[in-house]
Image (cartoon, grey):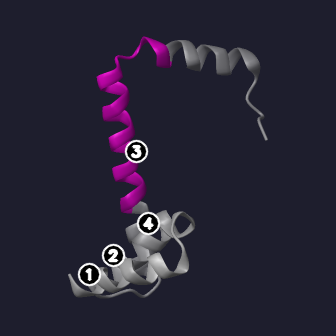
Amino acid sequence: MNDTPAEVESRFNFLLRRISPEERLAMSCRMFTAARALVRSSIVQGGARTAAEIRRQTFLRFYRDDFSDDEQAKILSSLKAT
């Protein structure tokens, strides 16, 4: 779905291209940091109490679809140990 008018999207793309690659990278890092903070808050509100549980739930929220069940089990096990 794309409900953005073409002229608005064109203007946005023009402005984005004017930003240096370094600033675009900094912007994406800030957005990822904000996303992690929102996810962490949601996980804590959902009842996770330990740092290990928060790490495991964060991993699943961000990367669940990127790993097989076996790979996930190994990763989650290592997150439990740290």
Task: Identify the residue position indicated by label 3 in the image.
Answer: 31
**Start and end of the magenta stretch?**
16-37
**Dot 4 lies on which element?**
helix
Question: Amino acid under label 4?
Answer: Val
* Spatial CA span between label 4 and label 3: 12 Å
Q: Secondary structure at mark 1?
A: helix
Q: Return the residue at label 2.
A: 55
x 39%, y 17%: residue: 19
Answer above or below: position of 28 versus 7.
below
**Badge 2 density bin: few <14, some 14–19, many ≥20, Cα 10 Å:** some
The alpha-carbon separation of the residues under discs 2 and 4 comes to: 11 Å
Q: Regarding mark 2 in the picture, which secondary structure is present there? A: helix
Query: Label 1, on which residue?
Result: 51
Which quadrant would residue 11 be assigned to in this image? Answer: top right
Q: CA distance from mark 3 to mark 1?
A: 22 Å
Which residue type carries mark 2? Arg
| N-terminal label among 3 and 1 | 3
Mark 3 packing: few (<14 Cα in 10 Å), some, or many (20+)? few
Residue occupying the point 43% across, 77% down: 57
What amino acid is labelled 3 in the image?
Met
Q: Cβ–Cβ below 8 Å for labels 1 and 2?
A: yes
Q: Earlier along the polypeptide chain: callout 3 or callout 2?
A: 3
Amino acid type, callout 1: Ala
Q: Position of residue 43 (x, y in %)?
A: 43, 77
The residue at the point 43 percent across, 80 percent down is 45
Number of the label disc, if any, that sits on residue 39: 4
